[in-house]
Image (spheres, rainbow, N blue to C red):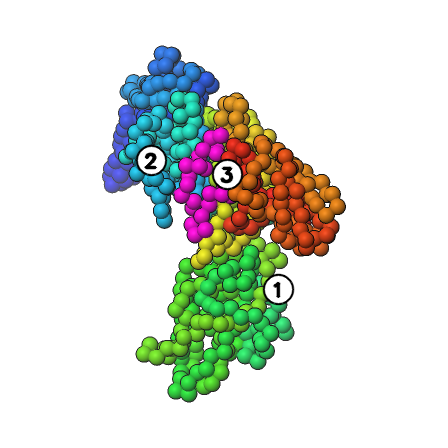
Amino acid sequence: MTKTFYNAFFASALQLVLLIFNTTANAKVTPAACFTDNMVLQQKTNAAIWGTETPAKAFTIITSWNNKTYKVTPAANGDWKIKVATPSYGGPYSITFNDGETTVLNNILIGEVWVCSGQSNMEMPLTGWNNDVINLQQELADAANYPQIRMIKIDNKTSFTARTDVPVKWGWNVCSPQTVGSFSAAAYFFAKNLYQQYHIPIGIINSTWGGTVAEAWTSGDALKTMPAFTPFVQAAENGMTQETLNAKYQTDLGEWLTDINKLDHSYQNGGLLWAMPTLDDSAWQKMNVPAYWEQSGVPNYDGTIWFRKKVNIPAAWAGKNLKLDIGGIDDFDDSFFNGTEIGHTELFILKRSYTIPANLVKSGDNTIAIRVFDSGGLGGINKGPMTLSVAGDTSAKIDISGAWAYQKGNELKTLPQAPMLSNSPNRPTLIYNAMISPILPFTIKGVIWYQGESNADRAKQYEQLFPLLINNWRQKWNEGNFPFYFVQIANYAATDEPPAADWPALRYAQLKTLSVPNTGMAVTIDIGENSDIHPHNKQEVGRRLALIARAKTYGENIQYSGPLYKSQKIIDNKIELIFTNGALTAKGDTLKGFTVAGADKQFHPANAILKGNTVIVTSADVANPVAVRYAWANNPICNLYNTAGLPASPFKTDDW
C-alpha cells in the first residue's frame, strides 16, 4: 500500500472517531417538538411524553407537580416514550430532563387538551384572510384575560409514509393580545367558552389545512376499505417515490384524457364531431362568458361542457397566424379552431394563449370550440379578456366574450377517476401520515372538526368516508371512543364564486354521521355569508361546539343542539314532522324553508305551521305528499329553531 493510501485511511478513521466522539459528547435528551414551554397536558390521566436520546443512554424525568422521578432508557434507535401521571387541573409546573445535562420545560399547565382539525374554516385565524372575525379589536384586547388557554400549530406537511417526528410550525403559545391573532378562531372561541364555564386550562393542538379533503386526513389501511381510494394507497405502499409518481402522473393523465375522448358524446368515427365547423349547434343553449357555469344556468355540475362560437375574420387576417387569448379556465381545456386542436392546458390557474396556424384561418365565419373539463368546485371559462388578434400585432383585436353556444358532455360521476399529483395535499392519506400520525401518542380529551366543503361534490361518498375517519382516528389514538364534535358546513352562495357542489347533500351526510357514538354536530346554517365561504362569526361556531362538549363531555344539563328531524306521518294531504331536542319555535312570523314532493319527486314550496313539537307541512301543488325537505339549498332561507335559540339542521325525509 502506498503512503498516500495510509494517510487517507488514517485521516478518514480519525474523522470517524471525532464524529462519534462529538456526537456522543453533544448528545442531549430531546423531547418531541410538541413538548415545549407553556404546553398543556391532559389532566387525571397517564399522559405520554416521548422523544430521542443517545441510544441506550439512560436519563431521568422529574415532574414538579408530584416531584416524581421517572427513569428512562432509550431504545436501540434512540427513541423513548413514557407515561407520566397527571393530577387534577392546575399549574404552572415544570418537567426536568437530566442525562448529565439538564433540560427544563417551564410554565406547564394541567387541564383539558383538544385537537382541532379540518380545512380552512377551522384553520382560519382571528386575523382572518379576506376579513377578520367580527369585533376583532375587542377580542384581541379580551385575550389578555385567558392566559390559561394555550395553542400549538402543527405545520402543513405531506408524507407517503407515517411520520413519527412532529412537524411543528410554532410551539405552545400563551393566549394574549399579541398571540391570539394567529390562533384558530373557531378553536379559540371553543376554548374560551369552556374556560369561562370551568376555569380549567385548555390546550388546543391545531392540525388544520385549508382546502383539503377528508380522505387526505385518513390512514391508508382504513382507506383501503373504500375501493375508490385503494389505488392511491397501494402506490405509496409499493414504495413509489414522488419522482416516479410524478412521471406516472404524466402518463396516467394522458391516458385519462384519451379515455375521456372515447367517452365524450362528441367523439364519433374517430373525430371530435362537436369541434367541427359544419356542426349545427343552433339547438344548443347560450351562455355569456367569461363566467362560472354554476351562476349561468348549470348548477351543481362537474364534468365536461363544450362551448362554441362563430367569429367573423376580416379578409386582411386570412392566411395569417392568429393569437387566441381565452383567459382562465377551470380546470382543463381542449381548444379547437375550425375543427383542429390548437392547444390544451391541464391546470386551472394558467391563462390560455394559443397560436392559430395560418392555414386554418379564412375570411368570414370561423368556428372556435372549447371543451372544458371541471373536476370539482367551480367550472367554466371564468376570466377574461377573451380576444383574437394577429400574432405579433395587438393593435387590433376581436372581442369574443359574450354569448357562446354550450352543451353538456359527460358528467364527472360517469368518468373514470382523474389521476392526482403525487405531492398534492389532497392525495389520500398524505396529510394523515404527516400531521396526524406524529401526534397520535399525545393524550387528548377529544377532537373538534370543521371540514366538508372540499368533499361536497362527493357527498354520497362522504356518508361512508366521514364515519370511517372518526373511527380510524379513535382506533389509532387508542384513547377509546373519545368525543368527536364537528361543524355542519354553513350556508353560502357567492355571486361571483358560487359553490359548484351539492352542499345540502354534504350537510345531510354530516347529519347522518351523528349515528356514530359520542359525536355531536354544531349547526351553522344561519351564520354563513352570501359572499364569503369563511364566515366571520367564529364566536358562535366556537360557542355551539362548546355547548356540545359541556353537555356530552362534562355532563351539564343544557340544551346543546337545535331541532333534529325524527320521523314523519302522512295524514291525507299533510305531512306531520316530529323533532327531538327542545321545544320548537319560528324565528319570525311564519316558518320558511320547507318543500314537499309527491311520488313524482318534484319538490314544491310548502306551507308549514307549528303545532306543539311538530311541524305540519302542506302544499296546494302536491295533493298526495310523500316527502319533505328543509333548508335544502346552498344558501337557504330557513328559520326553524328551538327555544334555546339553536337552529334546526337541514334534513330530508326521502332517500332519493
Residue on which disc 2 sits? 139
- Residue 436: where, in percent of width, then height? 46, 35
Badge 3 element: strand
The span picked out in magenta is: 522-547
**Disc 3 marks which amino acid?**
Val
Name the N-terminal-most of marks 1 and 2: 2
Residue on which disc 3 sits? 487
Badge 1 element: helix
Q: Is residue 502 above or below residue 202?
A: below
Q: Magenta stretch containing residue 558, yes or no?
A: no
Q: Examine the image and state in which quarter residue 386 appears.
A: bottom left
Q: Magenta stretch containing residue 527, yes or no?
A: yes
Name the N-terminal-most of marks 3 and 1: 1
Residue on which disc 1 sits? 263
46 or 444, which is in the foreground?
Answer: 444
- Residue 367: where, in percent of width, then height? 50, 78
The residue at 72%/48% (across/down) is 573
The answer to whether residue 458 is left or right of residue 142 is right
